[in-house]
Image (spheres, grey):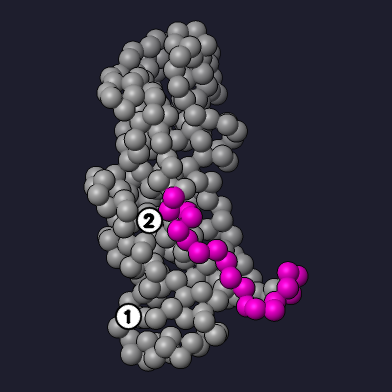
Amino acid sequence: MTYSAHFRIWRGSAAGGSLQDFDVDVSEGEVVLDIVHRIQATQAPDLAVRWNCKAGKCGSCSAEVNGRPRLMCMTRMSVFTEDEAVTVTPLRAFPVLRDLVTDVSFNYTKAREVPSFAPPEGLAPGEFRMQQVDVDRSQEFRKCIECFLCQNVCHVIRDHEDNKPAFAGPRFFARLAELEMHPLDTVDRRKRSQEQHGIGMCNITKCCSEVCPEGIKITDNAIIPMKERVADRKYDPVRWLGARIGRRGDGGAEV
């Protein structure tokens, strides 16, 4: 079954732009990215759109569809009525390069600021031993496909450009939590999470968890536990003393 759908796609650059209208055929089972590709092929060959796997695993085709951040390859046309206009716009939290393509380099800058995993000295690969509960926790965070939808909906980044230097955002709070909760990691990331990555600026609205295509409970399982650990370190005198004497290993505690 085929029907004609009305699409409105944002066209432009950092200098400005506007929505452009397209009428396009839609077939049963198609997703928004299929239709964008059809518009490219038949009506707007210069339309810029980023995509790669078309299987919901690369995170490349993030956009806002009817105002909601989504992966275009995972948004079926069947969720819209046949007479409903479908509006596709670029992610609002990041600078537009052209049309639906945004500059997400902010996220890679933040990724480089997170210290890498640091196992105990002398522990060789293959000698790691972990409880299954710790494995499961790390695996949840590692499901992230870096679509940056969580970064896009975070109002601390989206609505306040001047916050970006001091705020890493939910994707990297999950990374910090993964490492901080790893039983073999020797770096204390609590002070860094607050003072360099700005976790205290998050007011746990859970909007990041709501848009995650992998269903990661970013707020409940990463941000809130990290906030609790930061508060314990800063205000609990017993924990503060434990950090001072390097309970996690020589040079491991950050004071």
- Residue at 45% over, 14% down: 46
Element type at marker 2?
loop
Element type at marker 1?
helix
The picture quadrant where one finds residue 201 is bottom left
Q: Position of residue 66 (x, y in %)?
A: 33, 29
> In the rendered view, does 102 fall on the left or right side of 159?
right
Callout 1: 10 Å neighbours few (<14), some, many (20+)?
some
Q: Relative to residue 54, is residue 59 depicted above or below?
A: below
**Lower position in the chain sequence, tag 1 or tag 2:** 2
Q: Look at the image and tell me in which quarter the C terminus lies.
A: bottom left
Q: Position of residue 249 (x, y in %)?
A: 55, 84
Q: Main secondary structure of the magenta part?
A: loop
The picture quadrant where one finds residue 63 is top left
Which three-letter amino acid code belongs to the residue tagged 1?
A: Lys
Decide whether residue 121 is among the magenta residues: yes
- Tag 1–tag 2 contact (CB < 8 Å): no
- Residue at 54% over, 85% down: 250
Q: Position of residue 155 (x, y in %)?
A: 27, 48
Q: CA distance from mark 1 to mark 2?
A: 20 Å
Which label belongs to residue 122? none
Which label belongs to residue 234? 1
The answer, for residue 98, to whether it is visible in the render is yes
Considering every residue shown, the one lying at the far top of the view is 42
The answer, for residue 134, to whether it is visible in the render is no
Which label belongs to residue 168? 2
